[in-house]
Image (cartoon, rainbow, N blue to C red):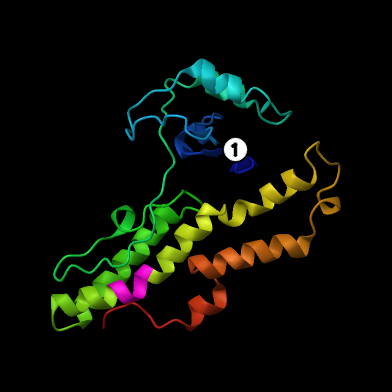
Amino acid sequence: MINAGSSRQRVVIYPISRAQETQGRALVNWVATRKTDEGRPMPPQDWTYTARREEVLAAFAAFAFDFLDVPALIRGAEVVYQYPMVDRDPLPSWDFGGVTLLGDAAHPMHPVGGNGASQAILDARVLAWELASQPMVEAAVAGYDARRRPPTAAVVQSNRRAGPHRCQDLVEQRAPDGFAHLADVVSRQELEQIAADYKRVAGFEVESLNSRPSLSIQ
Protein backbone atom coordinates (compact mmCIF):
# COMPACT_ATOMS: atom_id res chain seq x y z
CA MET A 1 0.00 0.00 0.00
CA ILE A 2 0.99 3.64 -0.35
CA ASN A 3 0.25 6.39 2.16
CA ALA A 4 1.47 9.73 0.79
CA GLY A 5 1.01 13.23 2.18
CA SER A 6 0.18 14.39 5.69
CA SER A 7 -2.82 15.04 7.92
CA ARG A 8 -3.47 18.18 5.89
CA GLN A 9 -3.81 16.22 2.68
CA ARG A 10 -3.06 12.58 1.90
CA VAL A 11 -3.79 9.63 -0.39
CA VAL A 12 -4.03 6.00 0.68
CA ILE A 13 -3.89 3.42 -2.11
CA TYR A 14 -3.85 -0.38 -2.06
CA PRO A 15 -4.76 -3.31 -4.37
CA ILE A 16 -7.92 -5.29 -3.59
CA SER A 17 -8.10 -8.05 -6.24
CA ARG A 18 -5.85 -11.12 -6.44
CA ALA A 19 -7.74 -12.20 -9.60
CA GLN A 20 -6.72 -9.00 -11.37
CA GLU A 21 -3.09 -9.47 -10.29
CA THR A 22 -2.94 -12.90 -11.96
CA GLN A 23 -3.90 -11.17 -15.22
CA GLY A 24 -1.13 -8.59 -14.88
CA ARG A 25 -3.58 -5.89 -13.88
CA ALA A 26 -4.47 -4.14 -10.63
CA LEU A 27 -7.83 -3.24 -9.14
CA VAL A 28 -7.09 -0.65 -6.49
CA ASN A 29 -8.95 1.20 -3.80
CA TRP A 30 -7.86 4.78 -3.29
CA VAL A 31 -8.84 7.33 -0.69
CA ALA A 32 -7.96 11.02 -0.94
CA THR A 33 -8.47 13.14 2.17
CA ARG A 34 -8.12 16.87 2.66
CA LYS A 35 -8.81 19.17 5.59
CA THR A 36 -11.57 21.65 4.90
CA ASP A 37 -11.56 25.33 5.74
CA GLU A 38 -13.00 26.31 9.11
CA GLY A 39 -16.75 26.80 8.83
CA ARG A 40 -17.02 25.28 5.37
CA PRO A 41 -20.18 23.14 4.97
CA MET A 42 -19.44 19.42 5.05
CA PRO A 43 -20.87 16.97 2.52
CA PRO A 44 -23.75 14.76 3.68
CA GLN A 45 -22.87 11.73 5.81
CA ASP A 46 -23.96 9.49 2.96
CA TRP A 47 -21.81 6.72 1.45
CA THR A 48 -23.50 7.21 -1.96
CA TYR A 49 -22.86 10.98 -2.26
CA THR A 50 -20.72 11.68 -5.33
CA ALA A 51 -18.00 14.31 -5.56
CA ARG A 52 -17.21 16.69 -8.39
CA ARG A 53 -14.28 14.98 -10.08
CA GLU A 54 -12.84 18.31 -11.26
CA GLU A 55 -12.53 19.55 -7.66
CA VAL A 56 -10.75 16.39 -6.56
CA LEU A 57 -8.36 16.55 -9.53
CA ALA A 58 -7.55 20.18 -8.83
CA ALA A 59 -6.84 19.45 -5.15
CA PHE A 60 -4.51 16.53 -5.92
CA ALA A 61 -2.87 17.68 -9.14
CA ALA A 62 0.54 17.78 -7.41
CA PHE A 63 0.32 14.08 -6.44
CA ALA A 64 1.82 12.91 -9.73
CA PHE A 65 4.90 10.87 -8.84
CA ASP A 66 7.36 9.05 -11.07
CA PHE A 67 6.12 5.74 -9.58
CA LEU A 68 2.41 6.57 -9.37
CA ASP A 69 0.10 9.03 -11.12
CA VAL A 70 -2.65 9.80 -8.60
CA PRO A 71 -4.53 12.23 -10.90
CA ALA A 72 -4.70 9.45 -13.51
CA LEU A 73 -6.25 7.14 -10.90
CA ILE A 74 -8.85 9.80 -10.10
CA ARG A 75 -9.63 10.36 -13.77
CA GLY A 76 -9.92 6.61 -14.39
CA ALA A 77 -12.32 5.86 -11.53
CA GLU A 78 -15.87 4.97 -12.55
CA VAL A 79 -17.24 7.15 -9.76
CA VAL A 80 -15.78 9.27 -6.95
CA TYR A 81 -17.64 9.26 -3.65
CA GLN A 82 -17.29 12.02 -1.07
CA TYR A 83 -18.05 11.85 2.64
CA PRO A 84 -16.85 13.64 5.77
CA MET A 85 -14.22 12.06 8.01
CA VAL A 86 -15.69 12.73 11.44
CA ASP A 87 -15.52 11.27 14.93
CA ARG A 88 -17.36 11.81 18.20
CA ASP A 89 -16.19 12.59 21.73
CA PRO A 90 -15.82 9.42 23.83
CA LEU A 91 -18.97 8.56 25.76
CA PRO A 92 -19.07 8.41 29.57
CA SER A 93 -20.69 4.96 29.42
CA TRP A 94 -21.92 2.31 26.98
CA ASP A 95 -23.75 0.49 29.77
CA PHE A 96 -27.54 0.62 29.44
CA GLY A 97 -28.34 -2.41 31.60
CA GLY A 98 -29.15 -5.20 29.15
CA VAL A 99 -28.15 -3.07 26.17
CA THR A 100 -24.73 -1.86 25.07
CA LEU A 101 -22.89 -0.41 22.08
CA LEU A 102 -20.19 -1.89 19.84
CA GLY A 103 -17.93 -0.73 17.03
CA ASP A 104 -18.70 2.55 15.30
CA ALA A 105 -21.85 3.01 17.38
CA ALA A 106 -19.67 3.05 20.51
CA HIS A 107 -16.53 4.83 19.31
CA PRO A 108 -16.68 6.47 15.85
CA MET A 109 -13.13 7.55 15.07
CA HIS A 110 -10.97 8.95 12.32
CA PRO A 111 -9.79 5.99 10.19
CA VAL A 112 -6.18 5.64 11.27
CA GLY A 113 -4.32 2.34 11.33
CA GLY A 114 -7.41 0.30 10.45
CA ASN A 115 -8.75 0.80 13.95
CA GLY A 116 -12.33 1.50 12.98
CA ALA A 117 -12.61 -2.19 12.09
CA SER A 118 -10.02 -3.77 14.37
CA GLN A 119 -11.34 -2.15 17.55
CA ALA A 120 -14.84 -3.38 16.66
CA ILE A 121 -13.47 -6.93 16.39
CA LEU A 122 -11.87 -6.57 19.82
CA ASP A 123 -15.20 -5.27 21.16
CA ALA A 124 -16.94 -8.39 19.89
CA ARG A 125 -14.32 -10.74 21.37
CA VAL A 126 -14.53 -9.13 24.81
CA LEU A 127 -18.32 -8.88 24.80
CA ALA A 128 -18.62 -12.55 23.81
CA TRP A 129 -16.20 -13.51 26.59
CA GLU A 130 -18.14 -11.49 29.16
CA LEU A 131 -21.50 -12.93 28.06
CA ALA A 132 -20.11 -16.46 28.32
CA SER A 133 -18.42 -15.85 31.68
CA GLN A 134 -20.92 -13.75 33.63
CA PRO A 135 -24.11 -15.11 35.25
CA MET A 136 -26.27 -12.18 34.09
CA VAL A 137 -26.40 -10.03 30.95
CA GLU A 138 -26.22 -6.85 33.04
CA ALA A 139 -22.97 -8.00 34.65
CA ALA A 140 -21.54 -8.91 31.24
CA VAL A 141 -22.39 -5.50 29.84
CA ALA A 142 -20.81 -3.76 32.84
CA GLY A 143 -17.64 -5.85 32.51
CA TYR A 144 -17.44 -5.22 28.77
CA ASP A 145 -17.89 -1.48 29.33
CA ALA A 146 -15.14 -1.39 31.94
CA ARG A 147 -12.68 -3.30 29.74
CA ARG A 148 -13.30 -1.74 26.34
CA ARG A 149 -14.49 1.85 26.77
CA PRO A 150 -11.28 3.37 28.25
CA PRO A 151 -8.88 1.88 25.66
CA THR A 152 -11.07 2.79 22.69
CA ALA A 153 -11.42 6.35 24.04
CA ALA A 154 -7.62 6.56 24.02
CA VAL A 155 -7.55 5.42 20.37
CA VAL A 156 -10.14 8.05 19.41
CA GLN A 157 -8.03 10.77 21.00
CA SER A 158 -4.81 9.47 19.44
CA ASN A 159 -6.40 9.31 15.99
CA ARG A 160 -7.41 12.95 16.34
CA ARG A 161 -3.70 13.71 16.64
CA ALA A 162 -3.00 11.60 13.51
CA GLY A 163 -1.81 8.51 15.40
CA PRO A 164 1.16 6.90 13.62
CA HIS A 165 0.78 9.37 10.74
CA ARG A 166 2.41 11.97 12.99
CA CYS A 167 5.68 10.94 11.33
CA GLN A 168 4.42 12.40 8.04
CA ASP A 169 3.28 15.60 9.73
CA LEU A 170 6.70 15.88 11.37
CA VAL A 171 8.52 15.55 8.04
CA GLU A 172 6.23 18.09 6.35
CA GLN A 173 6.78 20.53 9.22
CA ARG A 174 10.57 20.18 9.16
CA ALA A 175 11.07 19.95 5.39
CA PRO A 176 8.20 21.78 3.66
CA ASP A 177 10.23 22.12 0.46
CA GLY A 178 11.26 18.46 0.28
CA PHE A 179 14.39 16.55 1.20
CA ALA A 180 17.02 14.26 -0.28
CA HIS A 181 17.46 11.84 2.62
CA LEU A 182 14.79 11.04 5.22
CA ALA A 183 17.42 10.59 7.94
CA ASP A 184 18.33 14.26 7.55
CA VAL A 185 14.80 15.22 8.57
CA VAL A 186 13.69 12.66 11.14
CA SER A 187 15.69 10.03 13.01
CA ARG A 188 14.92 6.33 13.03
CA GLN A 189 14.49 6.53 16.80
CA GLU A 190 11.79 9.19 16.44
CA LEU A 191 9.93 7.06 13.89
CA GLU A 192 10.18 3.96 16.05
CA GLN A 193 8.93 5.90 19.10
CA ILE A 194 5.88 7.18 17.21
CA ALA A 195 5.09 3.63 16.08
CA ALA A 196 5.63 2.21 19.58
CA ASP A 197 3.40 4.84 21.17
CA TYR A 198 0.54 4.00 18.84
CA LYS A 199 0.96 0.24 19.24
CA ARG A 200 0.67 0.71 22.99
CA VAL A 201 -2.47 2.87 22.71
CA ALA A 202 -4.17 0.64 20.13
CA GLY A 203 -3.30 -2.60 21.90
CA PHE A 204 -0.82 -3.93 19.32
CA GLU A 205 2.25 -4.02 21.56
CA VAL A 206 3.76 -7.50 21.34
CA GLU A 207 4.69 -7.93 25.02
CA SER A 208 1.24 -6.79 26.17
CA LEU A 209 -0.49 -9.16 23.75
CA ASN A 210 1.67 -12.11 24.78
CA SER A 211 1.06 -11.52 28.49
CA ARG A 212 -2.69 -10.90 28.17
CA PRO A 213 -5.05 -13.68 29.32
CA SER A 214 -6.72 -15.59 26.50
CA LEU A 215 -10.20 -14.56 25.39
CA SER A 216 -11.06 -18.15 24.48
CA ILE A 217 -13.95 -19.79 26.31
CA GLN A 218 -13.16 -23.26 27.69
Residue at screen point 45% across, 35% down: 19
Q: Is residue 129 above or below residue 124?
A: below
| Residue lying at the far front of the rendered structure | 39
User: Looking at this view, is 101 or 173 the one in front?
Assistant: 173
Which span of residues is magenta-colored?
145-149
Quadrant containing the N terminus is top right
Residue type, numbered disc 1: Arg
Q: Position of residue 117 (x, y in %)?
A: 39, 54
Instruction: Look at 31% across and 58% down and name the residue there.
Output: 106
Secondary structure of the residue carrying numbered label 1: strand
Could you classify mark 1 by the number of other residues whose Cα lies within 10 Å: few (under 14), some (14-19), or many (20 or more)?
A: some
Left or right of residue 13, residue 61 in this image:
right
* Res. 204 visible in picture: no
- Which x, y percent locates residue 203? 49, 69
The answer to which image quadrant residue 45 occupies is top left
**Residue occupying the point 52% across, 15% down:** 54
Q: Residue at x 41, y 58 (%)?
A: 118
Q: Is residue 73 magenta?
A: no
Q: Is residue 204 above or below residue 73?
A: below
Where is residue 111? Give x, y as percent: 47, 48
Magenta-drawn stretch, dominant element (helix, strand or loop): helix
Is residue 17 at all visible to an observer of this figure? Answer: yes
Residue at the spot of label 1:
10
Front in this rendered view, residue 70 or 153: 153
Rendered location of residue 148, percent (x, y) = 35, 70
On screen, residue 216 above or below 83: below
How many numbered marks are there? 1
Outermost residue to the top: 54
Residue 147 falls within the magenta-colored stretch? yes
Judged left or right of residue 172, residue 35 is left
State the residue in front, 40 or 65.
40
